[in-house]
Image (cartoon, grey):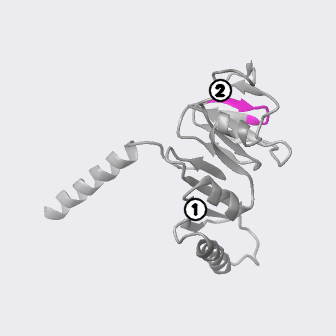
Amino acid sequence: MKKTMSFCTILAAVLFLTGCGNKFEPTESTIYVTSKGEVQSAIMESFDKAYYDFEELSEDVQKEVKSYCLDVNEEAVTVESLIQGEDEVTLLMNYQTAEDYAAFNEVLLFTGTYAEAVDAGYIPSELHDVEGEGIALDSEDLGNLKVIVTEESISIQTSGKIRYVSDNVSVMDKKLAKALEAGKTHPAFVLYK
């Protein structure tokens, strides 16, 4: 009886905690910028060749994380899990900041307000709302919105409701978008509240 009560208490706590805030449950390669500015990432890649070695991959990932953290701090980047499926591998990682994500992966990832992005030189060629209607880039409505700017063609989960995106982003639902054909010369912008 005591074990049953303990199990029920733990189950209730887990259900309560998972009901709070946003959940990161990706079904494809995705980055998620939390409300605290931390970044979670999921990399899902095919792993179907006979010569692929899961143990070697795991060691390489741990070595890269350790090397990066020695130069920054020991918790800047952590591996949450590395799981091998039938013909796919899934790597879940946590980054203390967007800067850690960008430096570790050697890609552009900017987070902040839209005004900060413009000040940093990240200006989209055009923006539209979730229905596809264009908006003026100097609109006062944009200034205090949060923004994610990336050069990766990847899914992007936000901690708030998506309001505007650049022309190379498709909105999947209110907090999930997909950057398409993003790159150094044409980064993807996701603005949210």
For residue 141, above or below residue 77: above
Find residue 62 and report its image quarter. Answer: bottom right
Residue sitting farthest toward the right: 185
> x%, y% of residue 146?
60, 36
| Numbered label attached to residue 102 | none
Instruction: Compare residues 36 and 93 and report the one nearer the observer.
Output: 36
- What amino acid is found at the position of numbered circle 2 in the picture? Leu
Residue 3 left/right relative to 62: left
Secondary structure beneath dot 2 equals: loop
Quickly name the residue at label 2.
Answer: 142
Residue at x-position 80% and y-position 44%: 182
Q: Residue 15: percent from the left, percent from the top?
A: 34, 48
Q: Is residue 160 above or below residue 23?
A: above
Front in this rendered view, residue 165 or 71: 71
Could you say where residue 69 lies in the image, as x and y percent from the top left? 59, 72
**Which of the 4 image quadrants contains residue 157?**
top right
Q: CA distance from mark 1 to mark 2?
A: 30 Å
Contact, mark 1 vs mark 2 (Cβ under 8 Å): no
Badge 1: how crowded within 10 Å, few (<14), some, or many (20+)?
some
Q: Residue at x 67, y 45 (%)?
A: 155
Q: Which region of the structure is painted magenta?
A: 163-169
